Amino acid sequence: MIRGAAKGLAGLLLAALLAVALAWPGSPMADELRPVAISFTQIDESRWRLDWKQPVASPAARLAFPKLPDDCRMEGEPVVRTGAAALIGGVEVHCDGPVTDERIGARDLVVTGDALLRVIPLGRAVQTYRLTASQPEATIAGVPATAQVWSSYFGLGVEHILGGWDHLLFVIALVLLVAKGWTVVKAATAFTVAHSLTLAAVTLGYAGLPARAVEALIALSIVFLAVELARGDRATLTRRLPWAVAFAFGLFHGFGFAGALREIGLPEGEVPAALVSFNLGVEAGQLLVIAAVLALRRAVQRFSPQTEPHAVRLAAYGIGITGSYWLFERIIA
């Protein structure tokens, strides 16, 4: 009896965790991946141009300053302007000698998020670095490694999918809805192919949609799957053709990914590498989420199978309410 009660309690706890995790609202504009962006561009032998963008949550926020190489100094006061939810600074810099092997970074800027640093020397390849709170500075290389762009944009892709709750809720609802090995794989593959197509098309300038419409359609896709999930074991459209539904909505999610990538910016001359590595990062994060949801559901099935339908229904309501809130917010904003 005690053992049965323990299993029931464990099942209820797991069900509660599932519902809370899936219903957590996150940010209503989850596609706005806006890391700090820093660009250090060489003008001539001794002059450089420093530009940076600092996302802000409050109009009262103050502009922070990147750290320059030791032999460099600003020429005059930075020109500061206000952008969309960001402060933008720019200033010319004089360097007394080569900046190779010098440190540049954003210790005061990289606090809650990441920074994307691009060093653009004259006549040499662009260098791209991803700065984090634990590694807020980078060493300027004489000959940059090709892996810089791949590793930087891969990390940004993982960060975007794990921090983008609208994409996450769609993937979670899809996994809960189909919940069968190969069916999940096929649906996830269709979603991947679809958003990869639109991500590439938008990034390369072949397609585009207004950002507000894209955000609303993504929220609508979440509501649609939540309704399908709440209908129980009925033969819904998604259960009959999960790959087709995943592909159709994946096209719109690709527009959202493209909007995030446009905010980050693409390195000149390295667009294909940045595009592919960002997409691979998105897929890696997506696979982690799928594995976590399947593992959590298997745990509920093992410890207390009788609570599984209730947990899934509760998750459906949480996802649906969150998606509906985002939908109305994005339509009327």
Image (cartoon, rainbow, N blue to C red):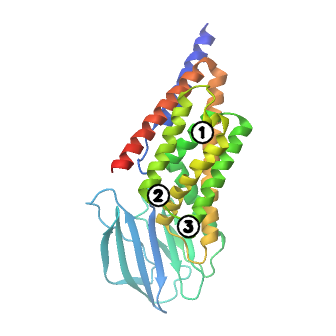
Q: Residue 291 sits in which quadrant?
A: top right
Residue at the image point whose x is 51% and y is 31% from the top: 316
Q: Secondary structure at mark 3?
A: helix
Task: Kindly identify which numbered label has been placed on residue 293.
Answer: none
Residue at the image point whose x is 62% and y is 60% from the top: 197
- Mark 1 or mark 2, whichever is nearer to me: 1
Which amino acid type is marked by label 2? Leu
Which amino acid type is marked by label 1? Leu
Residue 310 locus on image (x, y percent) = 54, 22
Q: Which residue is mark 1?
A: 174
Q: Secondary structure at mark 2?
A: loop
Q: Quadrant of the N terminus?
A: top right
Task: State the CA–CA distance, disc 3 to disc 2.
Answer: 15 Å
Question: Label 3 crowding class (10 Å Cα cut-off): few <14, some 14-19, many 20+?
Answer: many
- Whether label 1 touches label 2, CB < 8 Å: no
| Residue 225 against residue 190 in the figure, above or below | above
